[in-house]
Image (cartoon, rainbow, N blue to C red):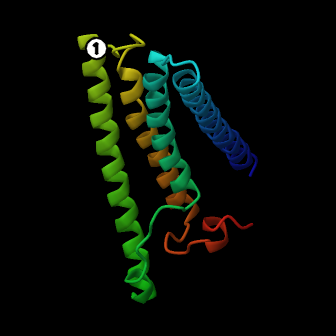
Amino acid sequence: DMRANTVSRLYARFLQLVDGTVALLVGLMVIAVTCNVIARYCLKVGLIWAEEFSMLLFVWVVFLGAYSALRNKAHLALTFITKRLPRGLRKVQRVLVLALVALFLAVIAWGGMQMVAGVVELGQRTALLRISSAWSIASMPVSALLMLLEVAMIFIRGEDITELEVSNAEGGD
């Protein structure tokens, strides 16, 4: 089906964009921390903005990394009970687990959006960079929404959430 192929290609490009963004953020974080270390220990001058900037980047890397881990099935999974269930109950368990994960992510997304709105309304700014504190808090609802999208894709594709690809988790093919 042409529409399904188009959606798959768009989703694949979107995933590349997210992965590229994470790589860029990690690179910027490494540069900021390295410059601050060099300035502090070699030049005896600290870059006061570097720590706050690297913390902002770190928050985004952690939350986007959680999305990437979900996508790559790299999260911790407790499958010892699931694998012992009869096949019929496994299907029910799969739907129940995906529904509970989706509910949890929806609550995180909603709460995160409320926090962002509150911070914007109050005009809270970071201490050194003087940018809106909403920039760091936004990582929570953005990542939760991305993970909700992935949970929906897992459900639609009918993926078995108990089958982990050990080679991927260990850095293999």
Residue 67 drawn above or below residue 20: below
Which residue corresponds to the image point at 36% horizontal and 47% vertical from the top-left? 105
Q: Secondary structure at mark 1?
A: loop
Percent position (x, y) of residue 162?
A: 49, 74
Q: Is residue 68 above or below residue 58?
A: below
Disc 1 packing (10 Å; few <14; some 14–19; many ≥20):
some
In the image, residue 81 above or below residue 47: below
Q: Residue at x 50, y 17 (%)?
A: 47
Seen from the viewer's position, the closer of residues 95 and 124 is: 124
Along the line of sight, which residue is nearer the eye, 3 or 22?
22
**Is 127 on the left or on the right of 1, as rendered?**
left
- What residue is pinned by disc 1? 124
Horizontal and vertical percent position of residue 173: 74, 66
Tell me how many marks there are: 1
Across and down, in percent, residue 116 comes to: 32, 24
Q: Residue at x 27, y 28 (%)?
A: 115
User: Is 110 displayed left or right of 25 in the figure?
Assistant: left
Query: In this picture, is 167 found above or below 72?
Result: below
Task: Decide if residue 78 is on the left or right side of residue 54.
Answer: left
Question: Looking at this view, is 133 or 84 the one in front?
Answer: 133
Residue 20 placement, left or right of 163: right
The amino acid at mark 1 is Gln
